[in-house]
Image: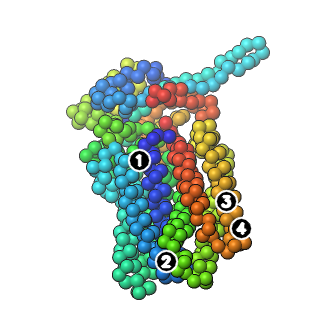
C-alpha cells in the first residue's frame, strides 16, 4: 500500500470553537468566504411529552472537515485539465496554472472541499499544509486545536490507533471516494438518520 | 441556482440544437417519404449549415463565460482518460470539424451522393456522442439527482425537439421570404407541405413526451431516497413557479400544434401560417430554457 497522508477527527471531543478553521484561513490567506476547513454543527431531535413532563431528546455535535485527500478522489477524476493531482504521499493538490475555473470538482466533491476563488478565477483547496509537513511539522489546523481533536499522520497508522470509521452523518458512504480520514464518532452521531439530524449552520459553511 | 450556470444552460442547449438540426437536415435529405426536392433542400440546407456553424461558434464563446480562467481553456483536453468534461469538449470539437468538412464536401462534391451521405452519417454520430458525453458529465455518483436515466433522456429530447423546431421554422420562413413557393409546381408544393406536416407531427410527439417526462421525473425524485428527495424539494419549494410555467407553455404549444395539424388536414397547406411560426418557435425555445434551468436548479450532492 502506498503512503497516504490523512487526518484524524475526534468528533466526540470537538467543542466547535473553530480555532482550526481560523488557523487554516490565517495560514493560507484563503480569502473572503473561502473556508478550506469548516466546522459543521449538526443538531436534531425534539422534546417528547411523557405524562406531564417534557423530556428532551435533542442531539448536537460538531465535525471539523477539510479535504480528505481521498484514495479515490472524484475531483482528480473529473478535472478536465489535470490541475487536480495526487502527490506521492497521497495529498491532493491543485496546480492553479492549469486550472480553468470550471468548478466541476466543486460539483462532484461530497465533502465541499474544492472552493472557488472568484478573484483568481481558479479553484482552491486544503493543501494539508504540505510545506509544514515537508518540514516535519503538523498542519496548522492540527496544532491550533485546543481540544486535540485533530491529528495528522499516515492513514495506516491512524487506522491502527483509532479504528477505521470514516463516515458519520452527514458524510457520505466511504466507498464513494475512499476518504483518507479516520473518525471517532460522537455518541449522538451513531444510529441517527438524516431525519433526526441536520447541518444547523449551513449559511456559515 | 447560481447565476454562473446561465452560460451552461445556453451552451448545452446550443450544442443540442446544432446536433438536432444536423440530424433533421439528414432526415429531410435522405429519408424517402419526407425527402425534400434537391433545389428546395439546397436552399434550406445552405442556410442551416451556416446557422449550425454560427450557433457552434457562439456556443464556444458562451461556454468561456462559465470559466473563471478562460485563458487556460486549452488545458480542458488534458484529462481524456477519466474526465467526461474533456471527452465532451473533444467530441464537440470533432463534431464541429466534421460538420465543416461535410459543408465543404456538400458544396464541392455534391454529385458524389455516397460520400455526402457517409460524412453526414459520421457527423451525426459524432453529434450523438457529444450529447452522450455531455450527459455523462452530469451523471456523477455524488449527485444522484442527475445520476439517472432522465439526464440523457432530457438531453437527447432537447436535441430532437430543438432540431425539428429549427428545421420547421427555417423551412417555413426561408421558403416564404424568398417567394420560393411561386416557383414550385403544385406537386412540389404539396410535397413540401407534407414534409412540414411531418415535422409538426414529430414536434407534437416530442412536446407530449416532454410533458410526460416532466411529471414522471418529479414523481421519481419525490418518491426516491433522501438525496433524490432533496432535489425534489429544491424543485417544488423553490422553483414551483417555473415548473407551472413550463407545463402551461407545453399545453399551449401542444394545443397550437394540434390546431395546425387540423388546419393541414383541411387545407393541405401550411405556408399561410408562417406569421405564427416565430411565436411557435419562440415558445419551444422558452420551454427548453426553463427545462434546462430546472435541471441545474435541482442540483444536490450527497455529503456536506
Q: Do the residues bearing badges 3 and 1 touch, measured as CB atoms within 8 Å?
A: no
Residues under numbered marks 3 and 2 in contact, where contact means CB atoms less than 8 Å apart: no
Q: Name the residue under label 4.
A: B262
What's the chain of the residue with tag 1? A
- Chain to which the residue tagged by mark 2 belongs: B
Q: Which of marks 4 and 3 is nearer the N terminus?
A: 3
> How crowded is the residue under tag 3: few (<14 C-alpha within 10 Å), some, or many (20+)?
some
User: Which mark is drawn over residue B256?
Assistant: 3
Separation (CA) of disc 1 from disc 2: 41 Å
Give neighbour class at mark 4: few <14, some 14-19, many 20+ (Cα, 10 Å).
few
- Contact between labelled residues 2 and 1, with CB atoms less than 8 Å apart: no
Question: Viewer-proximal residue, B211 or A144?
Answer: B211
CA gap between label 4 and label 2 equals 26 Å
- Tell me if residue B208 can be seen: no
Pointer 4 or 2: first along the chain: 2
Work out whether disc 1 and disc 4 sit on a shared chain.
no
Q: Residue at x 49, y 82 (%)?
A: B38
- Please check whether the numbered discs 1 and 2 fall on a single chain: no
CB-based contact (under 8 Å), mark 4 and mark 2:
no
Residue labelled with disc 1? A104
The chain to which mark 3 is attached is B
Amino acid at each position: 500500500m502506498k503512503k497516504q497522508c490523512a487526518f484524524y477527527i475526534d468528533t466526540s471531543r470537538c467543542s466547535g470553537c473553530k480555532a482550526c478553521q481560523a488557523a487554516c484561513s490565517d495560514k493560507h490567506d484563503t480569502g473572503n468566504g473561502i473556508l478550506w476547513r469548516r466546522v459543521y454543527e449538526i443538531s436534531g431531535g425534539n422534546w417528547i411529552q411523557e405524562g406531564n413532563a417534557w423530556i428532551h431528546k435533542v442531539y448536537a455535535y460538531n465535525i471539523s472537515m477539510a479535504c480528505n485527500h481521498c484514495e479515490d478522489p472524484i475531483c482528480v477524476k473529473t478535472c478536465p485539465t489535470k490541475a487536480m493531482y495526487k502527490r506521492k504521499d497521497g495529498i491532493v493538490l491543485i496546480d492553479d496554472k492549469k486550472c480553468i475555473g470550471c468548478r466541476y470538482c466543486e460539483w462532484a466533491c461530497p465533502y465541499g472541499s474544492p472552493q472557488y476563488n472568484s478573484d483568481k478565477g481558479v479553484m482552491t483547496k486544503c493543501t494539508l499544509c504540505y510545506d509544514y509537513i515537508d518540514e516535519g511539522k503538523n498542519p496548522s489546523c492540527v496544532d491550533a486545536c485546543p481540544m486535540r481533536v485533530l491529528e495528522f499522520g499516515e492513514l495506516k497508522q491512524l487506522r491502527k490507533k483509532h479504528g477505521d470509521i470514516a463516515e458519520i452523518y452527514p458524510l457520505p458512504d466511504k466507498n464513494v471516494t475512499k476518504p483518507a480520514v479516520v473518525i471517532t464518532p460522537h455518541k449522538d452521531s451513531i444510529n441517527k438518520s438524516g431525519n433526526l439530524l441536520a447541518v444547523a449552520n449551513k449559511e456559515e459553511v | 441556482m447560481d447565476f454562473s450556470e446561465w452560460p451552461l444552460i445556453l451552451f448545452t442547449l446550443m450544442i443540442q440544437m446544432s446536433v438536432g438540426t444536423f440530424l433533421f437536415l439528414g432526415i429531410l435529405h435522405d429519408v424517402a417519404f419526407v425527402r425534400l426536392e434537391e433545389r428546395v433542400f439546397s436552399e434550406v440546407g445552405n442556410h442551416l449549415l451556416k446557422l449550425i456553424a454560427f450557433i457552434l461558434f457562439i456556443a464556444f464563446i458562451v461556454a468561456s463565460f462559465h470559466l473563471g480562467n478562460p485563458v487556460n481553456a486549452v488545458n480542458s483536453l488534458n484529462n481524456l482518460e477519466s474526465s467526461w468534461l474533456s471527452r465532451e469538449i473533444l467530441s464537440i470539437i470533432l463534431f464541429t470539424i466534421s460538420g465543416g468538412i461535410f459543408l465543404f464536401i456538400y458544396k464541392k462534391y455534391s454529385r458524389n451522393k455516397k460520400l455526402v451521405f457517409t460524412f453526414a452519417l459520421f457527423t451525426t454520430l459524432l453529434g450523438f456522442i457529444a450529447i452522450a458525453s455531455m450527459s455523462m458529465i452530469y451523471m456523477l455518483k455524488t449527485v444522484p439527482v442527475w445520476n439517472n436515466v432522465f439526464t440523457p433522456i432530457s438531453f437527447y429530447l432537447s436535441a430532437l425537439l430543438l432540431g425539428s423546431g429549427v428545421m420547421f421554422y427555417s423551412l417555413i420562413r426561408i421558403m416564404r421570404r424568398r417567394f420560393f413557393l411561386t416557383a414550385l409546381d403544385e406537386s412540389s408544393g404539396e410535397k413540401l407541405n407534407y414534409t412540414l406536416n411531418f415535422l409538426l407531427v414529430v414536434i407534437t410527439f416530442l412536446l407530449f413526451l416532454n410533458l410526460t417526462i416532466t411529471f414522471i421525473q418529479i414523481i421519481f425524485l419525490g418518491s426516491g431516497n433522501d438525496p433524490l428527495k432533496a432535489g425534489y424539494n429544491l424543485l417544488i419549494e423553490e422553483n414551483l413557479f417555473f415548473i407551472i410555467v413550463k407545463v402551461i407553455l407545453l399545453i399551449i404549444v401542444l394545443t397550437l400544434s394540434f390546431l395546425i395539424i387540423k388546419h393541414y388536414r383541411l387545407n393541405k397547406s401550411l405556408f399561410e401560417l408562417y406569421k405564427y411560426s416565430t411565436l411557435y418557435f419562440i415558445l419551444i425555445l422558452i420551454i427548453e430554457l426553463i427545462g434546462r434551468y430546472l435541471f441545474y436548479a435541482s442540483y444536490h450532492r450527497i455529503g456536506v
